[in-house]
Amino acid sequence: MIELRQSRLDAAEALRAFEARAGDAGGLVSFVGRVRSEAAGGTVFGLHLQAYSPLTEQGMQTAADHALTRWPLTALSLIHRIGDMAPGDTIVFVATAARHRRDAFEAADYLMDYLKTEAVFWKKELTDKGARWIEPRAQDYQDQARWALTGDT
Amino acid sequence: MARLSFFGRLSDTVPSAEQTFSLPVSVRNTTELRRWLSERFMLAVLLDDRSIRIAVNDEIVCEPHGLCDEDHIAFLPPVGGG
């Protein structure tokens, strides 16, 4: 399931919904990304996220399709916020389900690396010292490159 | 008329993130558009920063890419969510 959401994202509710459709998978992995309250630029009081439809949704769907091809998943969920958020708000919810835990862990890790470096979003952090656009760090690109080195991305 | 969209940090450096223009006859591809916009908006970054990609009609293109006056042209700084 792929979703771009303008309204608040309740991670606990998203997990319950995911558990309900994960079937008899033995392993479920979920990841929740939240707005930090502190950053290098100062105290954060907001985050603004832009997307570009339909490129954003198409890219998320391609990544999800790739994960489903590469790992034997029984279910997958990829929900991403757009718009204006406050510290503590959930930005992203990723969940994977598989018969065995390692497949679920790896697929969730792959999907987060995709979201960090390739998903079509732009993030603007608003702090007490001003606003700045956040672009991927070198480490984010290295994390994403791991998936190409180990297989068929 | 061509529709231009500016995303991420570029959206703060132009008067409006969504604009409609009639492209001059001298602008026939993305390279010429970068040059024209850099002069019009004093946006040297469009010439100097090749990490800014261009999408034409919702597809990221290899440059230079031909343009016509009905295209939707989007300027995309490096992306990243999560």
Image (cartoon, rainbow, N blue to C red):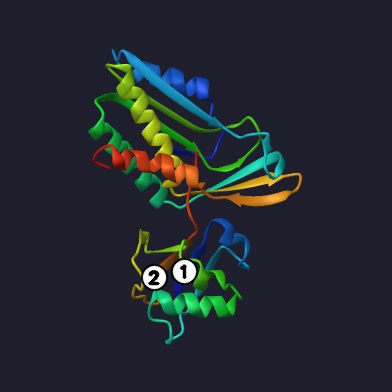
Q: Are marks 2 and 1 on the same chain?
A: yes
Whether tag 2 and tag 1 are in contact, CB under 8 A, the answer is yes
Measured from the top left, where is residue B10 in percent x and y? 57, 62
Mark 2 residue crowding within 10 angstroms, few (<14) / some (14–19) / many (20+): some
Q: Residue at x 60, y 31 (%)?
A: A89
Dot 2 or dot 1: first in sequence order is 1
Q: Residue at x 34, y 30 (%)?
A: A107
Q: Secondary structure at mark 1?
A: strand
Query: Can the viewer see residue B79?
Result: yes
**In the picture, residue A19 is in which quadrant?**
top left
Q: Residue at x 54, y 26 (%)?
A: A10
**Chain under callout 2:** B
Of residue B49 and residue A7, the one placed in the foreground of this image is B49
Q: Secondary structure at mark 2?
A: loop
Left or right of residue B8, residue B59 in this image: left
Q: Quadrant of the C terminus of chain A?
A: top left
Q: Which residue bears the numbered disc 1? A: B3
Q: Is residue A34 above or below residue A133?
A: above
Q: Quadrant of the N terminus of chain A?
A: top left
Identified by mark 1, the residue type is Arg
Residue sticking out furthest to the right: A128
Of residue B79 and residue A83, the one placed in the foreground of this image is B79
Left or right of residue A94, residue A64 in this image: left
Report the disc number at residue B20: none
The tally of labels here is 2
Q: Which residue bears the numbered disc 2? A: B71
Q: Is residue A146 above or below residue B37?
A: above
Identified by mark 2, the residue type is Asp
Measured from the top left, where is residue A114 in percent x and y? 40, 41
Measured from the top left, where is residue A29 in percent x and y? 40, 21
Q: Marks 2 and 1, Cα distance to the nearest angstrom? A: 6 Å
